[in-house]
Amino acid sequence: MENCLFCKIVAGEIPSKIVYQDDHVVAFEDIHPQAPVHLLVIPTRHIASMSDIQPDDGPVLAQIFTVAKQIAHERKLEDGYRFVTNVGPHAGQSVLHLHFHLLGGKPMGWPPFPPR
Ligand code: AMP
Ligand code: ZN
């Protein structure tokens, strides 16, 4: 996909701190970390968001989750972590290439919005 930031990261056209890469999945450090551990795990194939996932995408999604739990183990997130994807403007999705945030290393708030 032309002009997609994360497709360019997959292609090596934009520098990033890649921590895992195979034919289907890439994991790299978020450029503006919100927690001691903040990585993004993405499919190498361009999928705009969770809303565009198709039944055929099952294997790549399984690989994304498998890579994430392996990294969580390597980063010693035994006290817990969050694995989340933002979809659309209300969720704050800013890059239209499916990505999951792996967040951990400190306690996190829930629910993720302030009480009224
Ligand atoms: P979202 O707001 O859910 O779409 O998440 C996009 C994430 O991409 C944000 O956490 C950004 O900090 C991160 N990000 C943007 N540009 C880069 C980049 N060049 N390398 C790594 N992470 C990036
Ligand atoms: Zn893309």
Image (cartoon, helix red, strand yellow):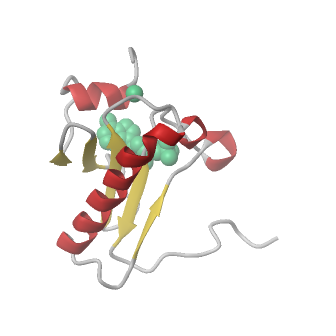
> Foreground: 62 or 49?
62
Query: Which residue is depicted at the point 63% across and 40% down?
Result: 88
Is residue 18 among the parts visible in the rendering? no
Name the residue located 68 percent from the left edge and 65 percent from the top edge.
Answer: 113
Q: Nearer the viewer, residue 108 or 4?
A: 4
Extreme residue toward the bottom, this view: 79
The quadrant where ligand 2 appears is top left
Residue in the foreground of this view, choosing between 111 and 56: 56
Asked if residue 11 lies left or right of residue 100, the reply is: left
The quadrant where residue 65 appears: bottom left
Instruction: Return the residue found at the far top.
Output: 2
Say above or below: 33 vs 99: below
Q: Is residue 74 left or right of residue 57?
A: left
Q: Residue 94 at x, y = what percent?
A: 52, 37
Relative side of 15 to 83, left or right: left
| Percent of width and height locating residue 33 | 35, 56
